[in-house]
Image (tube, rainbow, N blue to C red):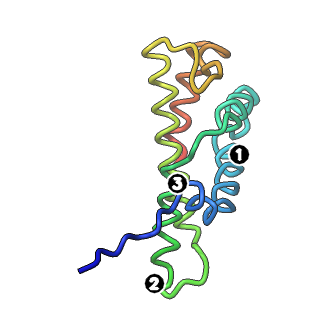
Amino acid sequence: MTAIVPERISVSSLLEVVLGDLLNLNNNLKSLFGAENPVLVSAAEQIFGAGGKRLRPALVFLVSRATAEIAALSELTTEHQHLAEIIEMIHTASLIHDDVIDDSGMRGGKETIHQLYGTWVAVLAGNQGFCQW
């Protein structure tokens, strides 16, 4: 009996499937996070301009696309987009607060929000992330 060995799929090739979704997500996060406060807008540019893998929302999009046919959907819905945004906002807000608590100066090779803007702005930015949805 011969075992069937599945073809290996790289993470980057999986993410290519949802690259457009992730680009839209990143733009939406910047506008949601900063709202109308110029300091928070600047902090949002720093936070979401830093890159990151966005694996949590990517998983939402991958599962959504994989099950879309079963649900008779031709495209992802705004609910899919909102779920991905919520998950990433909670994750990002947690990281901002974690950096304050740990007094971390760097995250992913870039200065943390509390290092750039001070503790008060970092706590406010983290709270803003938790409160958006």
Q: Could you say whether the residue bearing mark 3 is in a helix, strand or loop?
A: helix
Disc number placed over residue 81 in the picture, else none: none
What's the residue type where badge 3 is placed? Pro
What's the residue type where badge 2 is placed? Ala
Q: Nearer the viewer, mark 3 or mark 1?
A: 3
Disc number placed over residue 57 in the picture, else none: 3
Please provide percent x and percent y for residue 55: 51, 49
- The quadrant in which the N terminus is found is bottom left
Query: Disc 3 or 1, which lies upstream in sequence?
Result: 1
- Residue appearing at x 64%, y 46% in the figure: 29
Horizontal placement of 5 versus 64: left or right?
A: left
Could you say which quadrant of the image residue 19 lies in? bottom right
Please provide percent x and percent y for residue 117: 66, 16
**Which is nearer the eye, 106 or 115?**
106
Please provide percent x and percent y for residue 97: 47, 25
Query: Disc 2 or 3, which lies upstream in sequence?
Result: 3
Please provide percent x and percent y for residue 40: 68, 30
Disc number placed over residue 71 in the picture, else none: 2
CA gap, disc 3 and disc 1: 17 Å
What's the residue type where badge 1 is placed? Ser
Horizontal placement of 60 versus 74: left or right?
A: left
**Which is nearer the eye, 15 or 82?**
15
CA gap, disc 2 and disc 3: 19 Å
Determine whether 31 is above or below 73 in the image. above
Disc number placed over residue 31 in the picture, else none: 1
Q: Could you say whether the residue bearing mark 1 is in a helix, strand or loop?
A: helix
